[in-house]
Amino acid sequence: MSEVVSGAVPGAPEPVGPDTAVVVRLTPSRERRPDSAPLVREAAADALRVPPGEIRIGREPGGRPRLGGAAEGLHVSVSHCAGAVAVALSRLGPVGVDVERLRPLPAVALGRRWFSAAEARWLADRAAEEQPAAFLWLWTHKEAIGKVRGLGLSEGGLRRPVPYPSGLSWSDGLSWPDGLAQPDGLPRPDGPARTDGLPWTDAGPWADSPRLARPVLAPVPGEPGMSTAAPRVPGGYLLAVAAAGPAAPGAPVVVTGPGPSP
């Protein structure tokens, strides 16, 4: 079991848990569609500091996991892609999470086919090496919001408006000429790790100790009651988190990995 989420981020005064934040546990996986139940149970047990046997897992009619036992009332969302599984947990309100591995793809063509005209233009305006990350930024946000709504990408979800990334460094380190990715704070092949204060606690991808980042959820224009965040994660992945409810705006998102194996 991993360490309890703690104040490993410099300046964090006390632990942050699912009562006041969205906690996302990111786990490496070699399976394309792994059995998520053990990962959900372990993530909930870690977040609540209880034995895994005290966590009950059921299913809602639509297939979404529903937690009981010691985790009664805890909202959960699961996403998996090649190489990783993300489990998001919170009591703030319904949550959604989506994780995607950055990879070469025809971003502009896909954007014109699936997204709104404005989003397609925004994609086309990005530098060519930035377009796959930009496409997946929009995609993961749409997926995360759709999971909160219980609709996925159906009923117009692909054209659901989502926020664009802000800041000059949102894609720094994400796009290399070979089409792979490496988030900020990790060593790059042409130089040392960044030292600009980004909230990483160690340097190696999938290190044994938990990795924590704390962006905060921000309201989504045009989506009343919905907030999102996009924490940076290791190893060439993009992650989006969404949460609904009045307590969500301004709440932190804590990302942690698995602890050392016995």
Image: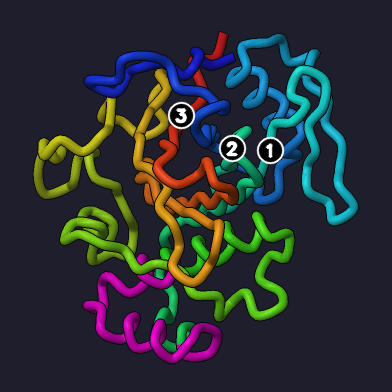
> Circle 2 is placed at which residue position?
92
Left or right side of 33 for 144: left
> Circle 3 is placed at which residue position?
256
Q: Amino acid at mark 2?
A: Leu
Instruction: Answer with mark 2 or mark 3, whichever residue precedes in sequence.
Output: 2
Q: Residue 236: percent from the left, percent from the top?
A: 38, 50
Label at residue 75: 1
Q: Amino acid at mark 3?
A: Thr
Determine if residue 218 is in view. Answer: yes
Q: Residue 138: percent from the left, percent from the top?
A: 45, 69
Distance of mark 2 from mark 1, alpha carbons? Answer: 8 Å
Instruction: Answer with mark 3 or mark 1, whichever residue precedes in sequence.
Output: 1
On-image quarter of the N terminus: top right
Instruction: Answer with mark 2 or mark 1, whichever residue precedes in sequence.
Output: 1
On-image quarter of the C terminus: top right
What residue appears at the point 37 percent right and 14 percent down from the top-left corner?
14
What residue appears at the point 44 percent right and 32 percent down from the top-left corner?
254
Q: Residue 23: percent from the left, percent from the top?
A: 52, 32
Residue bounds of the magenta highlight: 112-136
